[in-house]
Structure formats: structure tokens, C-alpha cells
Image: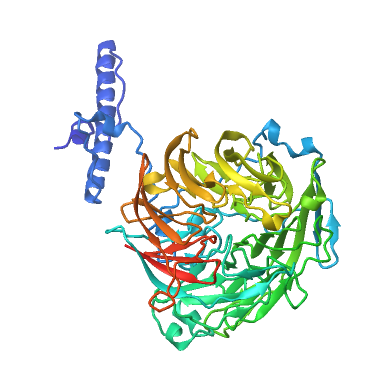
Amino acid sequence: MSDREQYIEPDNSYYKPSRDPGEGTVGLVVVMTVLFVILTTVLAVVYFNKRKSGDTPEVIDPSQPSTYISVASPTPTPVPPLTENQNAVLYPGTAMVTIDPEAVIDTNAVPSSRGLTETIFTGTDNQFLTEYSRENPIWFEDPINYGSLAGIFTFRGNNFRNCASFGYTNISEGTITQTWEFNNIGTLLASTLNFEWSGLRWTGQPLAVKWPSNMKSGMNLYDTARNKEDLVEVICAALDGKIYFFDLETGAQTRDPINVGASIKGTPALDPRGYPLIYVGQCDNNGTSGIFGMYIYSLIDGNQLYHYDAAEDSAYRAHWRAFDSSPIIDPDTDTLIWPCENGIIYTFELNAAYAPGTEDVVSISPVRTGYKYIFNDNSGSHMGVESSIAVYGNYGYFVDNTSNLVCLDLNTLHMVWCVVLGDDSDVTPAISEENGIPYVYIGTEVDNQGGTGQYCGAAYVYKINGLTGEIIWQTSEPCYTFNGETSETDQSGGCFGNPIIGKNSISNLVIFSYSMTKGLMSGNKLVAYDKDLGTKVWEYDMNIYSYSSPVDCYDAAGQAYIVIGDSIGQIHLVSATSTECRRLTYLQCSRNIGTNSATTSGLTFEASPIVYGNTMVIGTTGGSVFGISLG
């Protein structure tokens, strides 16, 4: 018989209180007992029903009470796997890219304190604007995401301008071997008519791209290139006015050159979306077409799709419209960003359209917007930009010919801050995000510190807060220079090669190259600085000067190697760690190797190289391009 049946009569008679006080007390106890039994019964029914439904009651282990009172930690977001199109050197991408618009600008970097004047214009009719806000805001993220194909798309690879190598470089023997040479680059008479441009010069970096099969099928590639499954195409723009195309592995030409018809000294750019477009600028007003500016070509058939002369713009240096800088493209907003030596920072809404594997047609319809600026202490005849622009989020960083390092908001075309460097600089700013803050690394030449003739001066290098313009540290190295009566006779020393932003095993370092450290036309030095302190960690001395940028590359274990070419055709291979470096070997390159006319004379590396896998590609001023195997 159940507990319930003990207290409830079968005939459902109800409880009636007794008139006897003693009897009432007993009755109250009975009532309380009945209520307790009912509650216990209900809980028991709930328990057994849950057991029948399959729920398992929680069993508490008294030896581990904290298990049941602590809040579970969130599961870390897994790192996405490296894709075929991403650069292993930059993996995994860690840059957060956040900008605080309320960051307080350093007192010494406030643009208005120098009487800044800014001008914005747009459209074919040069409509001037007092305020500007980009309809589709620009925002560049971690550089590992720059480029939808495997390759090197612009000078120093991406929007941070921090990487001219792609993929792992697995070095076991520490050797350098010259594997191929193309030596048919010609010359073009300069506009001054007193010398000929030849070969590849500063910055002159090659590009490289691995086209997918569905794109190659529609391109004007030679059959051998089109049918090669793993073709990596190398692209070099030269001072004879042509763009050349090579097979990375063999050096064989992959298609006919594009004839721009005007000298090209800087580094062109490929479209990071994988569109078959190349952007190239001329360095001299020596073209036969009368155009002095920039060009966009289709890499489907080599036809020119667009050119911009910039002659009609009200530039401070309207007579000099060279585009030596290497442009950058924001793929999300379809925007081309390109500083010019006339003193204007151009952005073009490209309105580009391309559908691979369908009609094999690429089209563009650019709409231009220009920005120019000047300070009270600047002369308009000296405005102009030769360095390429580096971009973090919507902040663009560049150096002009009046020693201004500028941070420009690309969405409002308003200057955020400006730092006056200790001398002239054509180096492209390099960005490193550290603890969530972008820092800009930059170096200067020895150019404006003395009068005519030879002297020794200081080449300055800086670490600058990219949000505020605050100089975190500054140091220098002595370098020699020669100021001639004309610019054609100058021979400057200092920083011409771009800095290395250390990664993997040397992530604590930034490395600068100093030219002419032992005298005029003599000596070069790679100096590694601690990123945080600016103190010198190690240095690598060379007997011969170099204007070429050093390139850092890494094996799968993160071991760092540095390659650099010098002014007599030597290539140095250096092993680097966070505390020291050592030369593994060097190679004296030869022209016309394997023939009776082989020679080591007349070789100068001024252009910057790239490293793709274990192959280095570098051009010379004499008209040769070399493929170099690192192993």
C-alpha cells in the first residue's frame, strides 16, 4: 500500500477538526505529514519521467566542486589553413588592422601647424571640392589577403610593402647558381638627349603570378607557356619602353613583349583580384606618343585599355608627370591608388569587369580623383612623390621630394599627420603592426646636408607610430655622397633599398641597407635593429655599394635568409637569426654565360629582386635579367 493510501480514506471523506485541543494538535501534524508526502511524490514522479525520456541526471563529484561553479573558457577561433594563393612567408595573418580616429596626433606632426593647404578635384572637368567622402570606403586588411592568385603583385608584394618573396625557400647547401639569363633588353634615348636609358634600374622589381588554366587559355601566351601546368610567369618592365614576360623556371619568353614606347624605371603592378590587368608608369618624357603618365594594359591580348597624361591637372610640378611609384589596388572597392611626381595623389575608380573563361574580355572605365597639398615652408617646384604608397586600413603612407612623410586618410583625402625627415627619401614606407598598432619604418638618403662635391653625412632611419606620427626611435649611419652641378652627375649614398620587416625567426628585427658606407662608390652595410628599442643587433658589411633592396625569405621552419645584389653584379646569401648573421656564400654573375663572349664586366644590380620559392629574379642596368637558384 502506498504512502498516499495510508492517509486518504477510500471513500474520499474530508478532514474535520476535533473539538478536543489535544486532538487538534495531533490533526495538524497529520496535515503537515500529508503535504510532505504529496511533495515528495510529485518530485519522484518528475524524476522517473525524466529517466524514462532518456535524460541522465547530473552526478556531482564532490572531489571536483570547481567543475560546476566555473564558467567555461571560450574556444579560440581556429587559424584558417594556408591556401594555395596565400604567401606562406606571411602565414598566419595576425594583423588586426584597427584605427582609432580619436588618436591624438603628436605635437610635432600636426599638419596645420605648418600652414597646410589641401586641394581635391574629380571628374573630367576637374571639379574642385571643399569636402570629400568616398562613397565606397577603402579598407586594406592583413597583407596575406592581398592577392587572389599566387604571386607578387606590386613593389614589396602587398599593401604593407613588407615582402618580396613568395613561398618557402628551402636552403640546404647554402649555394647560389645562375640558371638562366635574358639579355635582349634594349635602350631608349632620354628626353634630355644626352644619355640612353637601359636595362632595369631603381626600383625595377619583377612581378610574378601563377595564372589558373582557365585564364591561360584565353591569353596571348605562347603554346609552350599556355600548356605548362605549373607555369609561374615573371614580368619585368624595362627602360627600353617594353614589358617582358618569362617562365620563372627556364627564363624562356612566355609571350611577345608589350611596347609602351616610353622608359619605365619603377615597378609596375598586377591586379590583386587576378584580373588580367597590368598598371605601368613611365619615368621620362621620352615617348613618341606625346603622353607622359601612366598606362593600363590587358594581359589577354596586350592592348592598351587606358592612359592618363595628367597634363591638364593644376599640379605644382605640371611639367614632370613621371609615375615611378608602384601603385596599389583595393580589390573590394575597385580603386587604384597611385602617387605621381607632379605632386598629386591619384585614385581611380576603375569600374573593371572580367569573367574568366567566358568571353575572355576585360574592360575598365576609370573615374579619376586627385589630391594635392603644400605647406608654407615648401616650394611647389619641389613637390612630387617617387616612393610607393603603403596602406593600413584607410591610412596611406608615402614620402615626397621635400622630405615629408605623410599619412593620408584615403577616404576623406585629408592629411592625418606629417613628419619632416632629416633628408630626402625615395624609400617606400614599410608597415609593421605590433601589439595592435601600425608602425612605419623609413630611411633617408644623404643628399641635402652639404654643398656641391663629396662629403660624409648621416642616413637617418625611423620608427614612427602610424596613428599619431610620434617618432618612437631614430638612429643613423654615416654614408658618403657626391652632389654634382646637375642631378645627372649626383652619386648619393644612404638608404635606397627598402627595409626588411623581420618575420618568423627574426620577427624582433627591422633591417636597413646603407649605401656607400666606406667612401664614395664604396661599401654597403645591412644593419639589424631591435624593433622595440632601436638598438643595433647585428650588421653585415659589404665592400661594394648597392641601391638594390635586400629580400628576406624563409624555410618551412622559419629560418631566415637574406639576398642582396650589389653594383658589380655580385649576389650575397646571408643566414640571419634574431641575434646574429653570417654569410653563406656569394656569386659573381656573368653575362653571356656558356658562350665565347662570357664576361663579368658591366654588371650592375640597381633594381630590386624577388624570390619565388627557391628562384631569385633580378635585372641589371646593362640589359640582362637573371634567374638565380638558391639551394
In-front residue for pair 110/596: 596
Residue 228: where, in percent of width, then height?
40, 82
Q: Is residue 607 left or right of residue 452?
A: left
Q: Is residue 298 left or right of residue 416?
A: left
Q: Quadrant of residue 339?
A: bottom right
Residue 167 sits above or below residue 597 on the image:
above
What is the residue that sits farthest to the bottom in this orientation?
Answer: 223
Residue 3 sits above or below residue 117 on the image:
above
The quarter in which the N terminus is drawn is top left
Residue at x 26% of width, y 46% of height: 50
Is residue 39 visible to the viewer in this orientation of the structure?
no
Residue 478: where, in percent of width, then height?
56, 39
Residue 471: where, in percent of width, then height?
60, 35
Residue at x 29% of width, y 19% of height: 28
Residue 290 sits above or below residue 417 on the image:
below
Is residue 288 visible to the viewer in this orientation of the structure?
yes
Q: Quadrant of residue 367?
A: bottom right
Q: Is residue 77 left or right of residue 60?
A: right
Q: Quadrant of residue 202?
A: bottom right
The quarter in which the C terminus is drawn is bottom left
Residue 435 sits above or below residue 608 on the image:
above
In-front residue for pair 610/508: 610
